[in-house]
Image: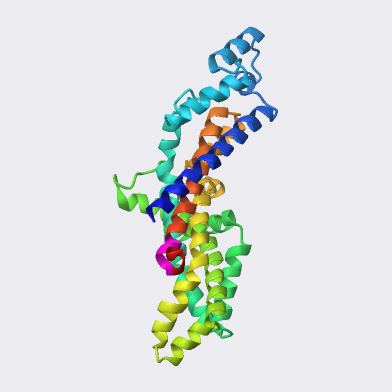
Amino acid sequence: MLSYVVRRILMMIPTLLGVAIITFFILRVVPGDIVEVKMRGDGAIVSVEAIEAERKRLGLDQPLGTQFVNWMTGLVTFDFGNSMWTGRPVIQEIAGRFALTFQTAILATLFAVLVAVPLGTVSALWRGSWIDYTMRLVTMGGLALPTFWVGLLLLMGLLWAFNWLPPLTFTPFFSDPMKNLSQLIWPAMVVGYRFASVLARLIRSSLLEILGEDFIRTARAKGASERRVIGLHALSNALLPAITVVGLEFAFLIGGLVVTEQVFNLNGLGKLFIQAIKNNDYTMIQGMVMMFAAIYVVANLVVDLLYAAIDPRVRYR
């Protein structure tokens, strides 16, 4: 198992290297100049000499090859450089918002798993009943309704029933756990609703397929209890594809909460990423893309390890 983990970690290197190369050069091809946006964005009259001086200060006057080597050298030491817009280190800009987005993604994932696993299992076991049709209707709503619209409805309901609105500032969990959860539980539930809908339908379809397999009939013929057949034999196999969805969806949530953060007034990574794109902040975009790519490859590694932990066939191979 250790050698397998080492090989998978080494495989991450060419993946992240490819992401770094593509991101760096695509940003230089896309039209737009951060210096022009920064100094002339409000219609200010700035001399050409001042523009060139700012480009030189930011290192944009250097050849692309030199800029790329400097950036890659910084990546090796986890130095993503300074934001071309604010001048602050990219690591600090990301760290200030990472806790909010990461906690929201964790809460949404926990909500989705706790709701989807029993819902999908009950729906499969009572196939064709009113329970199954109700579950399919609820999950269809989660897939069809836009997340931001569900969030707005939830906010209107909270305002009408409890006179509650999202706070203007984020409270860290260890500073005030109750205030922190009261702020993040609602966006987590909104995002988790769609997540749970996808997961519940996947578990239902996987469980229905596995319940018709020969090893399930064999287990029942040997006298195993229905609870053991469902819990030990059927559900453990049905969860394998669900684990993949959970891992990739969690990684997606780290950078995919842009609209939800806007609705609930959360200053997270998604909002930071949109601002960086709007400002053509090359270093910020590059740093965030590399962070998202690293989260994806780590999530894939964790999913593969969970596969081996759940399915002995994978572990023995």
Residue 26 position (above or below residue 200): above
- Tell me: residue 311, above or below residue 166: below
Residue depicted at 46% across the width and 57% down the height:
303
Q: Position of residue 295 (x, y in %)?
A: 48, 46
Percent position of residue 56, x then y: 57, 13
Residue for point 32% across, 53% down: 178
| Rendered position, 44 above or below 126 | above
Q: Main secondary structure of the magenta part?
A: helix
Q: Is residue 68 left or right of residue 177?
A: right
- The N terminus lies in quadrant: bottom left
**In front: 122, or 233?**
233
**Residue reaching furthest left?**
175
Instruction: Indicate whether residue 309 is drawn in magenta.
Output: yes
Q: Position of residue 239 (x, y in %)?
A: 48, 69
Q: Residue at x 47, y 87 (%)?
A: 218
- Asked whether 6 or 131 is in front, the reply is 6
As rendered, which of 81 and 15 lies closer to the eye? 15
Side of 93 relative to 132 (left or right): left
Q: Is residue 265 visible?
A: no
Question: Could you tell me residue 170's position as x and y percent?
Answer: 40, 43
Q: Is residue 308 left or right of residue 135?
A: left
Residue 316 among magenta residues: no
Q: How many marks?
A: 0
Res 180 visible: yes
Residue drawn at (49%, 53%) of the image: 300
Magenta segment boundaries in residue numbering: 306-312
Task: Give the colour scheme shown.
Answer: rainbow
